[in-house]
Image (cartoon, grey):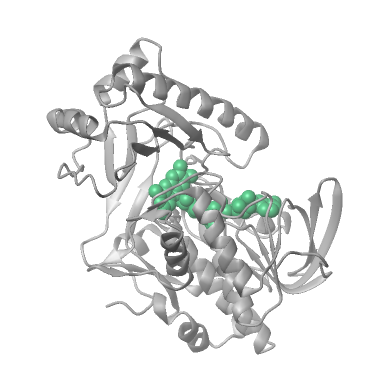
């Protein structure tokens, strides 16, 4: 896997090694394709590691997993490495687990490589160029999979994409994750139980300290700190998930508004604002929240968490009602049961839907095939969807499932020496049946 002798040409090139790109690349290599996975960081995982996002969101229906396959293998590897409890995990263990899977599968992984341009001829991408420490390298491929999160190959290749809300242009809020230790979880949860009116109504107060616990609220403390200019008025609540028996918790709390996670100057501003907010929240917790008296900041994420930027326009665009009405498709490649979740900008309301218990929606293969393109697929955060549908589809389990489906489709096109749209759907279905089999 270590790219001692990089080739100039690969069957399939996967751009971006987040959970979607990892899943696509492992599937491709196992199916016998020569695959180059290109990643800008010095490690894999994208939002799951650089963004420190955890836990995996809901993907269980009637106690059965909707997403299995490579996603489940990543989970199992993390459990084996002692780095995953319930649905939560450590970023460093994700990096290692995914690296092991890529290595075993025989993927050629190129790290520290930023894709800076794409060569397009008619409706085909012919090659990508990367910049590595000032050196430009060009790689040709037959099929390309865009798992950059920001649809960067789509954008650089001049294929169709959308960004933000169709009417207002709003993008979801940005969040810098951080982790704290030294928390007295017994005291902290006792306080929460005694002040239920200061927390979200959806919270479950049957705290089992041997499991991951979610706490969200402290509204009065947040309001007071904002009034006293100790906290940015963009922060709306404090949200953390504890790790069992460890005194540690991971915080999804900072809230950075009106900035675009795919614009360089905005990203720079967001990193500054995010780190300032983390500092403010840590101080607030240490100074006045019971259970946090001796707590300390362990680490904040390598980069700001970006929920939403560009989405590809595919042969099918997933819509709000596909999610809310739990639509099924004859060419389904994945299933989900996470509702629409929009972290609002100024001027709009937060939205967090629940899918009816026991129900799920499906994602058609057409939403992975980029419109107007002959050899370009997308998976994960840049899937073809409206903003609202994207709010449900963007989570890690679904990103892994769409990545694996792209890997399956691209390798079958290679094996059968045909165009991606001419691959017999039954063959794809057969190779990812574990993600279509529950119920
Ligand atoms: C704050 C926040 C909270 C979230 N909470 C949850 C949660 O609790 N549970 C859940 O399941 N999901 C959650 N999500 C959603 C989820 O984390 C992401 O949507 C998902 O991880 C996206 O995976 P991906 O592989 O599509 O993209 P990413 O993880 O973004 O990976 C893209 C990769 O491409 C690389 N890349 C980009 N451009 C280039 C380039 N030009 N050249 C080379 N490499 C490039 C990046 O470095 C990155 O590694 C959250 C997201 C955020 C931001």
Q: Residue at x 58, y 26 (%)?
A: 272
Specify whether residue 382 is in view: no
Image quarter of residue 268: top right
Whether residue 395 sits left or right of residue 44 in the image: it is left
Q: Residue at x 40, y 24 (%)?
A: 281
- Residue 158 vertical placement versus 68 (above, below): above
Q: Residue furthest right?
A: 135
Quadrant location, the N terminus:
bottom right
Whether residue 219 sits left or right of residue 9 in the image: it is left
- Residue 211 vertical placement versus 226 (above, below): below
Image coordinates of residue 322 in percent, x first then y, are: 36, 64
Image quarter of residue 293: top left
Quadrant location, the C terminus:
bottom left
**Which residue is nearer to you in this view: 183 or 363?**
183
Count of labels in the image: 0
Image quarter of residue 296: top left
**Which residue is nearer to you in this view: 64 or 141?**
64
Q: Residue at x 51, y 29 (%)?
A: 274
Specify whether residue 161 is in view: yes
Whether residue 33 sits left or right of residue 332 in the image: it is right
Image coordinates of residue 407 in percent, x first then y, are: 58, 74
Image coordinates of residue 74 in percent, x first then y, are: 47, 64
- Residue 19 vertical placement versus 402 (above, below): above
- Residue 309 vertical placement versus 251 (above, below): below
Q: Residue at x 56, y 45 (%)?
A: 50
**Which residue is nearer to you in this view: 37 or 261?**
37
């Amino acid at each position: 896997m270590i790219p001692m002798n990089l080739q100039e040409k690969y069957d399939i090139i996967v751009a971006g090694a987040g959970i979607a790109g990892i899943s696509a690349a492992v599937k491709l290599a196992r199916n016998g394709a020569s695959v180059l996975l290109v990643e800008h960081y010095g490690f894999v995982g994208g939002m799951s590691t650089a963004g420190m996002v955890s836990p995996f969101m809901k993907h269980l229906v009637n106690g059965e997993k909707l997403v299995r396959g490579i996603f489940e293998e990543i989970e199992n590897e993390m459990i084996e490495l002692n780095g995953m409890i319930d649905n939560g995990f450590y970023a460093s263990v994700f990096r290692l687990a995914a690296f092991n899977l890529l290595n075993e599968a025989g993927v050629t992984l190129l790290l520290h490589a930023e894709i800076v341009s794409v060569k397009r001829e008619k409706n085909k991408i012919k090659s990508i160029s990367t910049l590595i420490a000032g050196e430009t390298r060009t790689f040709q491929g037959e099929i390309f999979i865009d798992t950059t999160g920001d649809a960067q190959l789509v954008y650089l290749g001049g294929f169709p994409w959308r960004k933000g809300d169709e009417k207002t242009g709003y993008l979801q809020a940005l969040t810098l994750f951080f982790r704290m230790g030294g928390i007295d979880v017994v005291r902290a949860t006792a306080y929460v139980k005694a002040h239920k009116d200061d927390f979200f109504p959806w919270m479950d107060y049957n705290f089992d300290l041997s499991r991951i616990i979610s706490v969200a609220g402290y509204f009065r403390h947040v309001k007071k700190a904002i009034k006293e200019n100790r906290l940015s008025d963009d922060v709306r609540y404090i949200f953390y998930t504890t790790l069992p028996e460890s005194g540690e918790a991971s915080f999804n709390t900072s809230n950075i508004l009106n900035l675009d996670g795919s614009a360089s100057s905005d990203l720079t501003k967001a990193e500054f604002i995010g780190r300032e907010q983390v500092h403010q929240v840590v101080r607030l917790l240490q100074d006045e929240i019971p259970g946090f008296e001796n707590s300390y900041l362990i680490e904040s994420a390598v980069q700001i968490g970006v929920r939403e930027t560009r989405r590809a326009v595919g042969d099918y665009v997933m819509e709000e009602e596909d999610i809310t009405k739990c639509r099924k498709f004859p060419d389904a490649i994945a299933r989900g049961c996470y509702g629409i979740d929009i972290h609002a900008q100024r001027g709009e309301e937060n939205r967090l839907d629940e899918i009816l218990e026991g129900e799920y929606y499906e994602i058609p293969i057409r939403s992975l095939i980029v419109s107007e393109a002959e050899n370009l697929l997308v998976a994960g955060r840049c899937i073809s969807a409206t903003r609202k549908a994207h709010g449900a589809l963007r989570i890690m389990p679904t990103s892994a499932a769409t990545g694996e489906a792209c890997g399956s489709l691209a390798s079958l096109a290679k094996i059968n020496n045909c165009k991606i749209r001419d691959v017999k759907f039954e063959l794809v279905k057969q190779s990812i049946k574990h993600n279509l089999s529950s119920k």
